[in-house]
Image (cartoon, grey):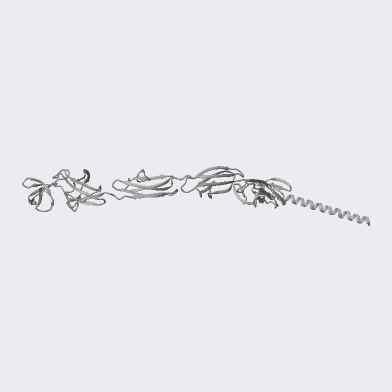
Amino acid sequence: MNKMIRFLLLCSAALFFTTACNQNNMQSSAHKKAQKGKMIFQSSPSGAKISIQGKMIGVTPRTTNPVYPGMYIVKFEKEGYQTQWRPVTVEPGKDTLTEIKFKPITSAAMITSTPRGAQIIKNGKTVGITPCILTGLQTGLHKVRLQLSGTVPQEISWEVNSDRPFTAHAKMIANTGRLRITSEPKDAKIFIDGEEKGLTPFNETLEQGDHEIKVTKYGFEPYITNIHLKRNETRNLNALLKIQPMQLVITSKPAGAMIRINGKDYGLTPYTFQTNIPGSYTVQIMKDHFGSEERKISLEPGNPYKLDFELSSEMGALEFVTEPANVEVFIDGKKYGKTEADPHNPNLSKTFRVNDLLQGVHTVEIVHKRGTPPRVRRKFTIRKQQTTRLAKTLKIWVPNVVLVHKRGWRVTGRVRDMKQDPIILESKQGVSSGYPKSDILRLEIIKDGD
């Protein structure tokens, strides 16, 4: 009985192992017959290392050799970026694309200082004021500069190679001296390195180093100097301001008047008087035939001044009319031109005017080369700022036509009205004759140039 049982058990075991072997052989044969696929890897940024089951197979972008279908665990690494793991399933006969977008490794830094309020400058830009936390710092070397007015600038540098935060504390060391500025006169504006700092007197701390000092006051020349202030030093500076030249512009009507200031002659108007001495000044101007005028003025620094004088003429004028026109005019032997014909009365001239004649007795003379007599004179008197008008017309007898009679004879004389009939011809001053137009062959006009 026991032998039978053993035999049955051995047969069953043999059958089981035979069946199992057959199944394994069938699965191995099916696996060999399955179609392989490829894995395609891409990343942003590229150049990432690719590892499958601990074995590096290259860098992105990468296409693998054909592999059996199934699931694979793939590792992607790139310096400065977070490592990523991805499951990749390959299906029979298909290519599988895997795209990776890396996130950079970033860290944070907490910067503090004593005293607080220091500027944190990174890459030339202010990124915060202490105390401050800087975030989003990528891997690599970082450097900041701490600046606080009145202290020595400090630099802090560190390297980020993980997401672990960085902390730093800076003790700011004072680097100031004291500057005291006075000026004569006081209340002058102060500029230090181009920045306005108020009025003198000035007493404040200032960073050590080189500084440009400028002191200005309206009406004074700027005081400019450069100083080198040392740490813990007290520097005293007294600015002596020089008065800018004060200008006084002097004009007059008419121009050309002589100028006298505080008893000293300075030229003719218009004139610009300059002085560095403030105070009261007496200005007098004088011009021949216009008299003089005097004024007082007080000059102060920084103010422009102007004096306008208008002098009254001590001269007068002369007006007269001549018969005929186009005669030369002389006054006291000086020629003043020719009279012009009056379009409304051709026998007379327009009113002739002579200005700026001195007070007193003068002689006016009219001249015409064909006149009888050739010169006529008359005395007149000029009074201050008055116009003297001669009551009587200045006359000089001048022939203006040649009458040609039909009988052949010719008569030279003066005709006042060419349109009337008979023609009245004055052959001599005061001697006239009438000629009917029917007896006249023609009238020849004598021109002034003839």
Report x, y in % for residue 183.
Answer: 52, 47
Q: Residue furthest left?
A: 407
Taking depth in this image into account, of 301 and 221 the one nearest to the observer is 301
Give the image location of residue 231, x and y in percent. 61, 44
Q: Is residue 63 at all visible to an observer of this figure?
A: no
Instruction: Point out the image quarter for the C terminus.
Output: top left
Image quarter for residue 2? bottom right
Please indicate whether residue 238 sits to the left or right of residue 170 in the image: left
Residue at 84% x, 52% y: name it. 17
Residue 5 location, x and y as percent?
A: 91, 56
In this view, the residue in front, 267 or 153, is 267
Q: Is 381 placed left or right of 279 in the picture?
A: left
Say left or right for 83 vs 392: right
Q: Quadrant of the N terminus?
A: bottom right
**In front of the other: 353 or 331:** 331
Q: How many marks?
A: 0
